[in-house]
Image (tube, rainbow, N blue to C red):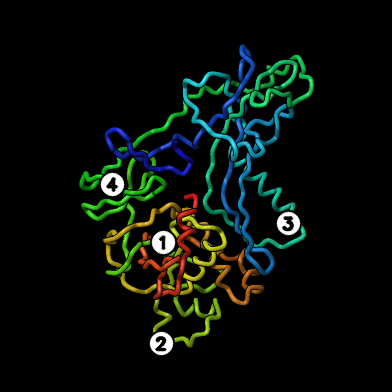
Amino acid sequence: MLKETDRLFTCTYCRVKSCLLPKGVFRYVLPHVAVPGKGVVYFPYWRYRGTRFCCIENEIRHQFVDVTHQAVESPYFPASMGLRAQAMKLAFVSPHTPGRFLSPALSIQDILMRQEVRFKTAMASRKVYHQSHVGEVLSLIYSPFYIGTQVVDAILNCPVSGPLPESFMNTLPESDLPDWQMQFLSALCPSCGWDLSGERNAIVLSCANCNSAWQPVGNSLKPVPVGFLPDDNADLFLPFWRIKADVSGIPLSSYADLVHLANLPRVIQKGWDQVEFRFWSLAFKLSPKVFLSLSIRVNLMQPLEKLKSGNPPGPLYPTTLSVAEAVDTLKTSLAGMMKPTETGFAKLPQIHIKALRFVLVYVPFRSGQHEWLQSCYSIAINKNLLSLTDH
């Protein structure tokens, strides 16, 4: 069964790997037990899942968001799906799915804007300096109904509206033929033709033959600049995005600037003003609290070792967070580094970060009893956090 986070599919018969390229977002349908002979009408809902980070007053808060909202405005259908998207088994929409599918009239951008308005209204009494989102997953879910004198939920077979006007059917939007389908791209290295490797949720695939990395973009595979910090005794390599960015609003171009910004207990050494500052961001998903604290720690440590080009010779943890999402989190990580917090947060609205270039860096970790350890940077990640994370 494919999941929203799946990006690589392996045929169980021939073992050929393919990259999944959904046309737009994933589209699902809920099962129903409609009364025989009743024509089913599928009403569309947008679903958004992700984590919101908010810089509020003198702290950074995080909130997991999983919401559904009508993709067609109508007072006769439920405003949301409640917990059904999480609790019920979803099936992919196919051209062979019978029923009338209503075309979405609202875009996902419309829904996200409304969510932002609601959030700002709820936080009206507190100062919100900045917010960002991580791990966004968007999908369209069709919920089944049938129409009589009332709108009837075809899952529970119970009415969800009052009496309908005679012209109700004419007010519904046009039908949307369920022609959505998954596209497949052969997971072969464009450089040498070798089979690319990666976990089913990985967005970056590696070639063991020519030591390159690739990411599906559009209808083709694009190269990803990749390197690693060498360690002959590493048990696992975790992926990080190292990003060179132009920061305006505050001085932050060198390691010396970072020491001042974060008020680090260090004496500025000669030459630190010539050491280029780079942002570091996780290229994999973790629980929000650990994600933020680990991002801040790696940024403060600023690994300066020279990278070796290519993929490392060892087990790779899958890259599940895109560089675009990583860029969105840079300002939040910066907020966590600024000391004192009160004066730092006040500067956030004037700070702008423009990413210039990036490289995917694999950092070596060694296996402890319960944790993955990176002793050079004093980092420890509980093994359960990686095994339980929904990539």
Residue ID for mark 2? 270
What kind of residue is marked 4?
Answer: Leu
Give x and y (percent) for residue 13.
29, 33
Please tell me the numbered disc located at residue 240: 1
What kind of residue is marked 2?
Answer: Lys
Q: Is residue 361 above or below residue 120?
A: below
**C-alpha gap between disc 1 and disc 4:** 20 Å
Instruction: Please rate how many residues cluster around mark 2, counting C-alpha atoms within 10 Å: few if below 14, some from 14 to 19, many from 20.
Output: few
Residue positioned 38% across, 56% down in the render: 317
* Labels 4 and 2: the sequence-earlier one: 4
The answer to whether marks 2 and 3 mark residues whose Cβ atoms lie closer than 8 Å is no
What kind of residue is marked 3?
Answer: Met
Indicate which label's residue lies in the foreground, 2 or 3.
3
Please tell me the numbered disc located at residue 123: 3
* Labels 4 and 3: the sequence-earlier one: 3
Please tell me the numbered disc located at residue 179: none
Circle 4 sits in a helix, a strand or a loop, which is it? strand
**C-alpha gap between disc 4 and disc 2:** 45 Å
**C-alpha gap between disc 2 and disc 3:** 45 Å
Indicate which label's residue lies in the foreground, 1 or 3.
1
Circle 2 sits in a helix, a strand or a loop, which is it? loop
Front residue of this view, candidates 250 and 301? 301
Quadrant in which residue 11 is drawn: top left
Circle 3 sits in a helix, a strand or a loop, which is it? loop
**C-alpha gap between disc 2 and disc 1:** 29 Å
Front residue of this view, candidates 53 and 345? 53
**C-alpha gap between disc 1 and disc 3:** 33 Å
